[in-house]
Amino acid sequence: MEKLSTQLRKHFILMFFLLSAATFFAITSVDDAFATEMGGHAYPLGAEDFYCGAVPPPGIYFINYFLYYSADEFNDENGDSAIEDFDFEAAVNTFRFIYVTKHKILGGYWGMHLFVPVWNLEVTHPPLGGSQARAGAGDIIIDPLILSWHSKNWHFATGVDVYIPTGRHDDHDFANISRNYFTFEPIFAFTYMSDSGYEVSSKFMYDFNTENKDSISGGQYLSGQEFHFDYTLGKKFGPLSVGVGGYYYKQITDDELNGEKVEPDGFKGQAIAAGPQIKYDWRNISLILKYLTEFEVENRPEGNDLWIKFVYAF
């Protein structure tokens, strides 16, 4: 059994670095590209929930995230609907591979992970030409240095996720499954679990975006820096956990087009979401279901998220 575990770890590390190499090869071969600056963001808001600050113990793990997001409004800077007949539907399945080593750095366990998203996207945007649909692999996310600390009731984790523009791009389309720029995202997450089973968890992120040099907006577009966090308040009843959760999103700096602020307000996005969440643990498997509704939305679509997550520990 130990020999099999060692082989699995070796295979995981090999896969991790092969995919990383393939990722960097892919970004050097992309010619035509376009990002969805208008209300877009790299991180799938609301992805994390129960125990999000508690990185699992040393071992190999797989998480499958399925997201269905739909919105029929695109709000302006005042929170009012700005685009008539707008519609946005996205079904995204993301494969996440996690490896936590037994090695420690600064007292925390060293781990790494890799995300591979697959998109099916449909957008109706009459001012930009009607409707478009796109499907395929999106931008890969990688972090080779995750650190996690654990005590009886508290758990902490930190790292820097890197979003690499490997998805399909077309500078003539407004429906795209890639941002066409890098995003560097420092992360801090925590989980508090009381002796009686009450949980408070949150994952805080701050995004630094590089410039999209081939934008549909007509030049070089720099999306502003973004602050956001996912959160969960829950209660554990044996293998069942129930709670409420969601996310908060706030763009901090202005968007810029060819070095100039995008008028009138820098196109700064904002959103809050909340909704019910449920989790069930069985042996080495966990299933999570949640439904989130957005409000207080500015300069981006306003809609609803349905999440289904599957977690497997090898």
Image: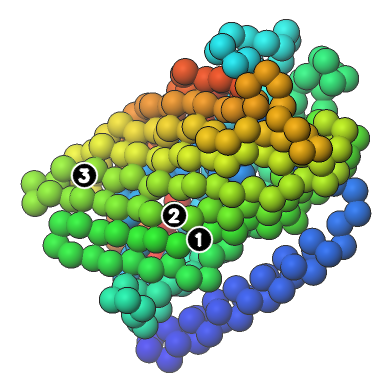
Instruction: Look at the numbered discs 2 and 3 and tell me whether their residues touch, using CB distance below 8 Å.
Output: no
Indicate left or right for 307 with 85 as reference. Answer: left
Question: Label 2 to label 3, Cα distance in Å?
Answer: 20 Å
Image: 200 above or below 54: above
Instruction: Look at the numbered discs 2 and 1 and tell me whether their residues touch, using CB distance below 8 Å.
Output: yes
**Looking at the figure, which quarter contains the N terminus?**
bottom left
Q: As drawn, which residue projects farthest toward the left?
A: 196
Q: Residue 80: which quarter of the image?
A: top right
- Which residue is depicted at the point 57% across and 42% down? 225
Residue 28 pos. (x, y %): 83, 64
- Which residue is depicted at the point 53% across and 85% down? 10
Which of 31 and 78 lies nearest the eye of the viewer? Answer: 78
**Does residue 255 appear in this view?**
yes
Amino acid at dot 2: Ile
Residue assigned mark 3: 199
Which of 267 and 54 lies nearest the eye of the viewer? Answer: 267
Q: What element carries label 1?
A: strand
Residue assigned mark 2: 187
Indicate left or right for 63 with 32 as reference. Answer: left
Which of 158 and 193 lies nearest the eye of the viewer? Answer: 158
